[in-house]
Structures are given as C-alpha cells and as structure tokens.
Amino acid sequence: MNILISGGSGFIGKALQKTFAQAGHSTFILSRSNGDFSWDPTRQWIQENALENIDAIIHLAGENIGAKRWTDSRKSEIIASRVQSTQLLVNTLKKSPHKVQSLIFASAIGFYGSDSGEEICTEASNPGNDFLATCTQAWEKEAQELPIDIRSVTFRIGLVLDAKEGIFPKISEPIKWGIGSALGSGQQWQSWIHIDDLCQFFLQGIENKSLKGTYNAVGPSP
C-alpha cells in the first residue's frame, strides 16, 4: 500500500517508515517542509496531489507537548495544531477525489486525565477534565467528521519508550550521573509502550481491515 504520514519526520514517524518498508509498503511524508508533500494547516492548505494514489493515512502531526512551558498561548497552539490539521485532512477527503480507504489517528491516553488514581481506564472510560484531556477530546471530535466510507482507527498512545529517543533517555540521564529520584510521588501509574510494539499497532491498523474505532495503545501492565 501507499501510506501518507503527517508529521512523519519525528520520532514515531521515522520508526513507522522502517516498519512499513519491512512489510512491503511505501510511505510518503506530509510536512510543512522537507516532506514528499506540503501543507499548512493554519491556512487550511494542502498540496493538490498529496492524496493521489494514497491508500491509507496516518495522522501524527501536532505541536510537541513537551517542547515548551505550558503558557496559555502555548496550550492554544498545541490544541490548534491538532484540530486544524485534522480538519484539513477530513475536509480534503470530503471534497477531493481520492482512493484512501483508511485513516489512522494518533491520540493519547491523556484523554483520561493525568491522574485517574487506581482506576483501570478502558476505551469506554469517561474523559478527564485537565488540559491534556481537553486537547485530546477536541482532536478526536474532529476525527469523527470523517466520511463514513473511510475506515477510521484512533490509537490513544501511552508513554513511548526507546533506548535512544523519546522520554526514556531524558528520565534516565540523571540516574547515569547518580542523582536519579522518583518522579513526583513515585506512586502514580504510568501506562507505556515500546516503540517497536507501537509500530506493530499501526501496522495492524493499516493491514487489518476489521479494526475500527478507538484502542488504547499501551503495554498490558502500567
């Protein structure tokens, strides 16, 4: 299949490209710059032929939530980047000729709030009420506007672990220098997934046509 990845130049996107290539699929990157196709969600513009001959889309694009301090303006940027980019993809699929059969959305377990205590959250659990929950709800709401003839899958992703990229090198660095300590109280639950397993989630999402709806992309044990 020909797979278009929005935000595909980041940590997860690069890993997905390798996984899909090994499975015999071709990938194309949709990016503001340095991609195979260009777009600008803030202007609701996308390159005219971006969806030509594309069978499936993986939507990863959005401002990095951990890159800067969460000021009010930064929070607005984070939400807008996800809502606007999703709107652009959905509207383009509604208005332009294409052969896209599936669209896989990357959401986050932040949907359930940052502290659900001892509750085991399933895909049917209620959303939280903090910033990340508000952000993911707004994002997923736009995804629901997708045309009904396109299969939609949403993965709510946990902390993605990898030896060299993502959050693990950052939290392990102090330990290497002998100054490591518990994060917060040390008693809070964290749901996680290894990057290789996450890539297999997305591969299944692309290849298994029976998958529809929302799935928590996390390991079995927090």
Image (cartoon, grey):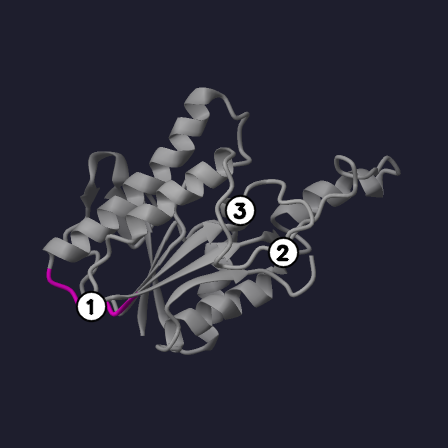
Locate residue 44: give its quadrant: top left
Secondary structure beneath label 2: loop
Amino acid under disc 2: Ile
- Few, some or many residues within 10 Å of mark 2 (<14, 14–19, 20+): few
Q: Give the label on residue 149, or none.
A: 1
- Few, some or many residues within 10 Å of mark 3 (<14, 14–19, 20+): many
Q: Among all residues in the image, which is located at the extreme right?
A: 178
Which residue is under mark 3?
112
Q: Is residue 8 above or below residue 128?
A: below
Q: Is residue 214 magenta?
A: no
Dot 1 or dot 2: first in sequence order is 2
Quadrant for the N terminus, please.
Answer: bottom left
- Few, some or many residues within 10 Å of mark 1 (<14, 14–19, 20+): few
Q: Nearer the viewer, mark 1 or mark 3?
A: 3
Q: Residue at x 51, y 65 (%)?
A: 199
Q: Give the label on residue 208, or none.
A: none
Q: Residue at x 30, y 55 (%)?
A: 36
What's the distance in space between the residues labelled 3 and 2, CA to CA?
A: 10 Å
What's the distance in space between the residues labelled 1 and 3, CA to CA?
A: 29 Å
The picture places residue 183, in percent across and down from the top left corner, at: 75, 38
What's the distance in space between the residues labelled 1 and 2, CA to CA?
A: 33 Å
Q: Residue at x 50, y 36 (%)?
A: 129
Front one among 147 and 170: 147
On screen, residue 148 versus residue 76, left or right, reads: left
On screen, residue 130 versus residue 219, left or right, reads: left
Regarding residue 220, the answer to whether it shows in the image is: yes
Front one among 38 and 51: 51
Stretch in magenta: 97-102
Q: Is residue 203 above or below residue 10?
A: below
On screen, residue 29 versus residue 220, left or right, reads: left
Amino acid under disc 1: Asp
